[in-house]
Amino acid sequence: MSKRSNLLLWGGIFLILGCDKDIQYTFLNFKAQLVVNASISIEDGLIVRLSRSVPPGGDEVYFKDLQVKDALVQVIAEDGKTFTLIHSEKGTYLPDSTFKPANRTKYVLKVSHRTYGNIESDSVIIPQSNISDAVIATITDKLSINDEQLIQYKINLQDPENTQNYYRFVFKNIYATVNRKTTASNSFLRNPSSTSACSYFSYFASKFIGDECFNGKPVTLIFDTEIEKLFIAPGANYILPSDMSVEIIYLSKEAFEYYRSRKVPEDFEHTFSDPLPLTSNVKGGLGMFIAYTSQQFVFKVPK
């Protein structure tokens, strides 16, 4: 085959692959459902956000138009006590001051709506933290690929007997002079061999590690995190953080599985695969009711 023929052949292939065609899908018998995004913890209390589902590929809808603000929302504690939540704003429901969540206590979420029906969650238990004093932070003499200074976090996690361990890590920059916090966008696991044979993953700026990473032994994770500059306005001088922090969130298993199901595969071979369903623990609707315990470690950044 001549060189000219090869060029024509490859040109034809690229032309075919480059053509787009819009395909319209019709979802018969679609019925809108309640979508719940709820969490409970000792540190942050109980927060429930409600919206409704829409058919895929439909007309564009603003999120404010999806919020459900007139539902009956209740949480039932293990001892049978029922607490009714009050709509606060933008589809968010909060309990009154008499509700005090407790560790190792089961809670069930129930929601009722005249249009979208009733939903009930599986019971969740706020896990007892095993974190204690687990973090050491040091400023390194190395620079990131962005030529930014790095802070190194050494996080020691134990594996208590008869306990499942699921963790989420969130790194933040704290700028005291302007009363502002930002999530550190560039954090990297420096010792990946510690999690090479288990379920460690990243989801946006958060890092996650699952119970199978422990196998009866403690795990030490070392993260390098950029000390990020904050520009107040275009052309203005930047400021450096006064402090940096890591929040270690001790998750229930269902919360860990939910975040793992939300992680989109990045490998090329997954490009044309079917989307994976999100984990849900809600019957009669969509979404999650998760439980967690968190502990924050704050460190001064030397000037």
Image: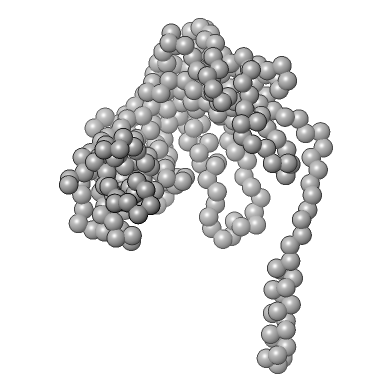
Point 34% across, 41% down: residue: 172
The reply to whether residue 139 is in sight is yes
Percent across and percent down for residue 132 are: 26, 29
Q: Nearer the viewer, residue 218 or 84?
A: 84
Percent across and percent down for residue 168 are: 40, 38
Task: Please determine whether, in this image, residue 120 is positioned above or below residue 57.
Answer: above
User: In the image as oriented, which residue stretches furthest toward the left?
Assistant: 303
The reply to whether residue 134 is in sight is no
Percent across and percent down for residue 60 are: 69, 41
User: In the image as oriented, which residue stretches furthest toward the bottom?
Assistant: 2
Side (left or right) of 159 relative to 279 = left
- Which image quarter: residue 97? top left
Point 53% across, 14% down: residue: 85
Point 27% across, 37% down: residue: 176
Point 26% across, 47% down: residue: 240
Task: Please determine whether, in this image, residue 15 is positioned above or below residue 103.
Answer: below
Quadrant the N terminus occupies:
bottom right
Side (left or right) of 274 relative to 202 = right
Percent across and percent down for residue 216 are: 34, 37
Q: Nearer the viewer, residue 271 or 71?
A: 71
